[in-house]
Image (cartoon, grey):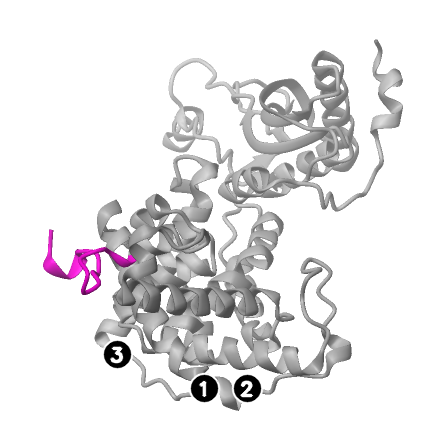
Amino acid sequence: MTAANCATMIRPRQDRPDLDEVTLVARSQDGDAKAFERLVDRYQGPLFRLALGMVRDRGWAEDIVQDALITAWRHIAGLSSPEAFPRWIYQITTRRTLNQLRSRQRRPADTTDPSLLDRDQRPGTHTEPAVPTGPTDPAMIAEEHALNDALQTEVGNLPDDLRVCWILYANHDRSYAEIGGIVGITHSAVRGRIARARHQLAEEMTPWR
Amino acid sequence: MALADQLPQLECGRTVEDVWANAAAPANQHEQHCEYCQQARHNLRRLQQAIQAERSLPPDPQQEPSGRVRAGIMSIVRAEIRHGRRIPLEYPPVEQPAGNTQTGSLTDAATDDTADAADPELAITEYALAEVIRSAADDIIELRARRIRLTPSPQRSGPEAEPVSVQVAISVSASASSSIPELAELLRERITVAVAEQVGLSISRVDVAVEDVHDAWAS
């Protein structure tokens, strides 16, 4: 019952990799820079992929993510509940991206043409354990790359308003309700945009085969 | 609702969503005989294959931001850290105005009861003190310390220097497998000892609010 009984609970000087996101957000709200750094580590990749999918320019996408996370740092104390952080940071990033696309603050240099990307197609590196049914045959891997490249091209051809919903839905696993909150549109508008995106992609994908 | 938000329709009058909803199942009666639906089913399956390909490919390094993003963010974050109030380790003696007013400056000093106490020689910022407390709490593996509030004892005027004590309010998540009263007691002890050893301040009270319980092994 005394504190001495709890001695096994103490393992000093850990960096506590187990800390959950609510804890990291709460600490960041108190101004803890180390906690916020871990949120940056968690979110910079997904947010970058979201922005890159929209603006298709690495430097531009990096600027957007940097600005979005700095804005988050400056205003995180005002976030009413730590649980709202993921949606909030997606919202900041998405709206910033859409605003910049509307005003075309920067000229995108087209660096994301999938055919220009330096892909590693060696079959030995294709070791995704999470996909046990994934092909190991080099011809099938090349086929997967071709399919993915075609998909990326067609996603890039979607209008901005459809593309943002599609990327949040297909690549970030956001629900219609979440997408509505992030983009600032109604649930039925999200449903309509996803349906139109799916329709357009499905029609355009076929000629590649 | 804007026209543009209506669901796309096939020539036969069905929506693409209808076809999508049934795409994984065998073609229904209508679809077996409708060329538009058959084409749409084919296209949607092709799209589904492409999405699966996208997910099964190894991560593309081109899809990761460069190190400048994190470095740029953190340099601004560190530059903008809110250090908070400076908490003195002790309040200096405040001379009582002996009898009636003597000089204007003495009267000013006596009525100046704001916390900055004439720029104390030894003080710690709230930020640094919270770091010490957080670090002490992090040693307890069953706890995840969240928010910390610090309230320094008020300054009382007196002829002697007076040590400052601090009240701590800390919110935590506790492991489901642990005894909360024991954890709270341990936390109080750790915080009090760490602050005394590392800062030289005494802790008058630690209020622990357990606002969440987490699984013992979940991250």
Same chain under badges 3 and 1? The reply is: yes
Mark toward the start of the polypeptide (3 vs 1):
3
- Name the chain letter of the residue that bears numbered label 3: A
Q: Which residue is mark 1?
A: A113
**What is the CA distance from the residue labelled 3 to the residue labelled 2?**
24 Å
Marker count (numbered): 3
Q: Kindly identify the amino acid type of the residue bearing the numbered disc 3.
A: Arg
Q: Kindly identify the amino acid type of the residue bearing the numbered disc 2.
A: Leu
Label drawn at residue A117? 2
User: What secondary structure do most residues of the magenta stretch adopt?
Assistant: loop
Query: Residue A32 location, x and y as percent?
Result: 57, 46
Q: Determine if residue A63 is in view.
A: no
Looking at the rendering, the stretch of residues picked out in magenta corresponds to: B1-16
Q: Is residue A43 above or below residue B141?
A: below
**Numbered disc in front, either 3 or 1:** 1
Q: Quadrant of the N terminus of chain A?
A: top right
Q: Nearer the viewer, residue A81 or A165?
A: A165
- Name the chain letter of the residue that bears numbered label 2: A
Indicate the secondary structure of the residue bearing disc 2: loop
The verdict on residue A5 being magenta is no
Q: Kindly identify the amino acid type of the residue bearing the numbered disc 1.
A: Asp
**What is the CA distance from the residue labelled 1 to the residue labelled 2?**
7 Å
Identify which residue is drawn at 11% across, 56% down: B2
**What is the CA distance from the residue labelled 3 to the residue labelled 1?**
19 Å
Label drawn at residue A104? 3
Q: Dot 1, crowdedness within 10 Å: few (<14), some or many (≥20)?
A: few
Tell me if label 1 and label 2 are in contact, CB under 8 Å. yes
